[in-house]
Amino acid sequence: MLSALRHLTFRAGEPGAWGTPLAEDPIAFLLDAVDEAVNVWTARGELVYSNRAAGDLDLDCPGHPGLTSFVRGHRRFERRCLAFDAYSTTYVVEIVRQIR
């Protein structure tokens, strides 16, 4: 997954990175294609990756591992988070979707 994130090279505020060819990186392709908001954070709360859908939510910190929900205006969301270790660092993958 971290390799795919490096391939995308999208860091908050750099939308030009979406032009990266993804033909040989299926995980990067999936991260780019999903409609749900995807963020990857360090355990210290630094944003490492954010897809286009996540930008609309403007989340400022990672959720806690597990399943939670929150409300923004009149919209309700489900937030799923998973912590994992790689390269001597703990990361949190966060997927957020609107509940209908």
Image (cartoon, grey):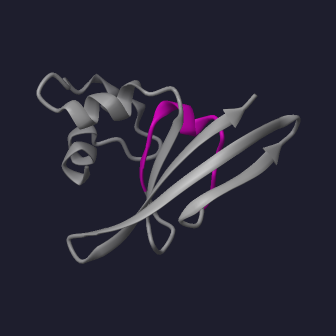
- Residue at left 71%, top 42%? 77
**What's the magenta region?**
48-62
- Residue at left 57%, top 38%? 55
Query: Is residue 82 shown above or below 12?
Result: below
Residue 52 spot, x, y in % from top left: 49, 31
Q: Quadrant of the C terminus?
A: top right
Residue 61 shown in magenta: yes
Splitting the image into 4 quarters, where does residue 19 fall? top left
- Residue at left 28%, top 46%? 5
Query: Is residue 9 shown above or below 45?
Result: above
Between 10 and 24, the residue placed more toward the observer is 24
Q: For this view, does 74 lie left or right of residue 31?
A: right
Residue 71 spot, x, y in % from top left: 81, 46
- Residue at left 25%, top 37%? 27
Residue 69 spot, x, y in % from top left: 73, 51
Q: For this view, does 33 lie left or right of residue 67?
A: left
